[in-house]
Amino acid sequence: MRLFEYQAKELFKAYGLPVPKSVLVSGLAGVRGAFATLSPPVAIKSQVLAGGRGKAGGIALVSDPAQAEKEAARIFELAIGGERPSSLLLEQAYPHDAEMYVSVSLDRGDRSFVVIAAQAGGVDVESMSGKVIRKLPLDGISQPFADEVASELKLDGERARQFSKILLSLERLAREKECELAEINPLAVGRDGMLIPLDAKVIIDDNALFRHPEFAKLHPEDEFEGEASRQGFAFVRLGGDIAVVGNGAGLVLSTLDLVGDAGGKPACFLDLGGGAQQERIEAALRLVNRLPEAKRILVNIYGGITRTTDVAAGLLAVISGGGSKPIFARVSGAEEAAAKEMLAGSPVRLYRTAPEAVEAVVMAG
Amino acid sequence: MNLPKMGAPVVVQNITGRYGRLHTRLMLDYGTNVAAGATPGKGGQSVEGVPVYDTVAEAVAKSGAVASVCFVPAEFTLAAGEEALDAGIKLLVIITEHVPVRDELKLVQLAQSRGATIIGPNCPGIIIPSQKVKLGIMPAPSFAPGGVALYSRSGTLTYEIAGQLTAAGFGQSVAVGIGGDPINGSTPMEWMDFVQGMPETKVVVAVGEIGGDAEERLARHIERSGYKKPIVSYIAGRHAPKEKKMGHAGAIIYGDYGTADSKIKALTAAGVMVAKTPMEVPSLVKKSLP
C-alpha cells in the first residue's frame, strides 16, 4: 500500500526525520488560511499516488494568497495518471543548493533489503551516478554502519553526522513499519547546512498489514476495489470495456495480453483465486456486472482445483437472475465435458480456446 | 540446491485445515508418500489415514519425514517454517499466499544456514510425473511423464501450459511453481541449474511474468554459463499497467523496472525462444528439439 506524501511525512515526523512545515487542505476554502500560517514561497503539491507529479504540473511554487488560490484550483482539477487529488499539501519551500537521494528498498534479485544513497538525487535511481548500495541486515543497522555509508558518499563533518541520523531513522521506520520502499528524493542540502527531506515515498508491504492496523483505513478506496478486496479477489480496475475474470493471477494476466493483442481494452483484472466455488464465481460476476464501464464479460477458467462444473453453475445462477451483461467464456480442465453440457443452450457464449473467446468478445464491441 | 530423494516421507503442516485435508488426499491418490501431519493441538487425530502430531519435530521423529508441504495461514507461516527447518526438514514447500516479505527473507536465510531448500511461498509446489510424486496442489491430470522441465511464477499458468504440453505429447520431467511473491525461496536460476543436471530433461520451459528482474538475471546467467539445454519461455503481462499489483504480490512494474518487454528482450538476446501466448509454447518446444 502506497502512502500519500502527507501520510509518509507524518510517519517521518514520528520517526524524528526533519520535514518542512506544511498544512494539508482538502478544499479550496482552506487554501488562504493555510497559506497565511506559512512563510512564502510556498509549494502547493497534489496529493496523488501516481508518479511524475512535478512533470505533470501537480506542483506549483507560489508567493501570495491570490496566486495560491489560483494554483490550488488548477491542481485540484488536474488528473495525474487518471487520478485527481482529494487534498493538497501546502508546504514551506526550503531554499537549498543541492539534492541528495536515500532510500531503503527490497532488492528482489539479491533477496535482501538495501540502502541506496547518492550525492546527486532528484533524478531516477537507475541513472544516478556515484550511488552507494549496501545490503541491510534484517535486524537493523548500527551507528557505525550509517557512518560508513556517509563516508562512502564522501560526506564529512556536520553533513555526515546529519546523514547518518537520517539513515538510521529511515531504516528503523522501514523495518518497523515493514515498508517495501521508504524513499527520500530529494533530500535537500539547505543553504543553512541542514539536510531536509522534501519528498517522501513510502510503500507498506500489503501482506504485513495485519501487524499494522494503523494503516488499514488510510486510503479512500475505489468502491469496486474495496468490495473486491473484502471478497478476497485480486482486482485491478483498468478503464476499458471488457471485464476479464479468471482463476489464477498468471492466467488472468495472460488473458489481458490476448485481449490487448486483439485490440480490446480490459475494464478490469479479476482473479478468483484457486479452488473457487460456485458462490465466489457468482460474487465475482455480480461485481463486474455492476462495474459501469464494463460492457461485456470475458471468463477464462482453467480448472485444476477449481471445478469447471462449479464455474458453470455460478454462470447459470447469475444469468438466471436476469440483466447480466453478455458473457463470453472459455472453460477447460476438471469436469470440462459436464460443464459444457450444463452451459449448452444458455446465453453464455462458450468457446473452445482462450484466443477464440477473446476474439469474439473484442469483435462484439 | 539439494533436494531429498523423491519418494521420501513427507509431512503436511496444518493437515487438519480445509486445504491441508483436501490436498493430502490428492497427494496420496497421486502416489506421494505422505507419512505424517502436524497441527498444534490436533496430535492423535488422523487425516485420510495419516497420523497427526502436535509438532513437526514429533512428526519427523515418528515418520522420518524430510520434506514438508505447508498449508499454514500467512500470519503463522514464519513460525511454521522455522519449526520445520529446526526439525530437520530439508525441502519445505510453502503453498500459503500473502506471507509478509520480511518473514520470507528470514526463512530464506534460515534455510540457507541449514542447507535446506524452500519452494514458494505462494506457489503450487513441485511434481515429478515419472515418479508419481507431487508435493503441492497441482491437478494431476494436466501432467504426464516426459522430457520438459517446466517452472513458473504462476500456478494456473503452470497447469495450463503443462496441460497443453501434455495434450501435444510433451510430458514433463519436473514441474515447479516457484511462487508469485517478490521473494522466492528458490530462484529461477537455481532451478535452471538443477534441471540442467537432470538427464531426462531435454528442454526447459521457463514461465515468467512482470515484476522484478529475475528473467533479466536469468538471461545473463544463460549467456555466461553457456547453458546447454534449449529453453522456451513465456512472459505474462505485456499489457499490464504500471504501479499495480496484478494478483501476485510480485507482479508489479515500477517505472521501467519489471516490464514484460525488458524480460522478453533480455531472454531473446540470450537465445531463448519466447512464446507470445501460452498456446504457442508446445510448438516452440517441438522446434527446440533436435
Image (spheres, coloured by chain):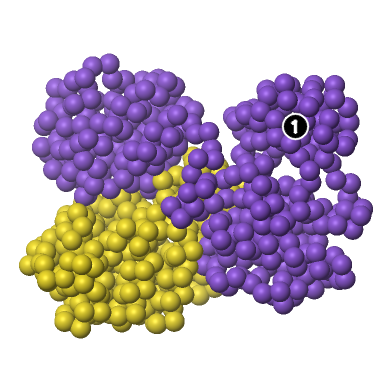
Residue B230 locus on image (x, y percent): 40, 65
Look at 74% across and 75% down and name the residue there: A148
x%, y% of residue A291?
40, 24
Q: Chain B's shade in the image?
A: yellow
For label 1, the SS is loop
What residue is rendered at 18% in x and 61% in y? B16
Residue A289 visible in image:
yes
Q: Which chain does tag 1 point to?
A: A
Q: In the image shown, does B283 or A111 lie closer to the viewer? A: A111
Quadrant containing the C terminus of chain A is top left
Rendering colour (chain A): purple
- On the rendered structure, is A144 left or right of A274? right
On the image, which quarter does residue A84 sit in?
Answer: top right
Q: Is residue B283 positioned above or below B272 on the image?
A: above
Q: Is residue B210 left or right of residue A91?
A: left
Residue named by callout 1? A57
In the rendered image, the residue lying farthest to the left is: B49
Residue B174: x percent and y percent? 28, 67
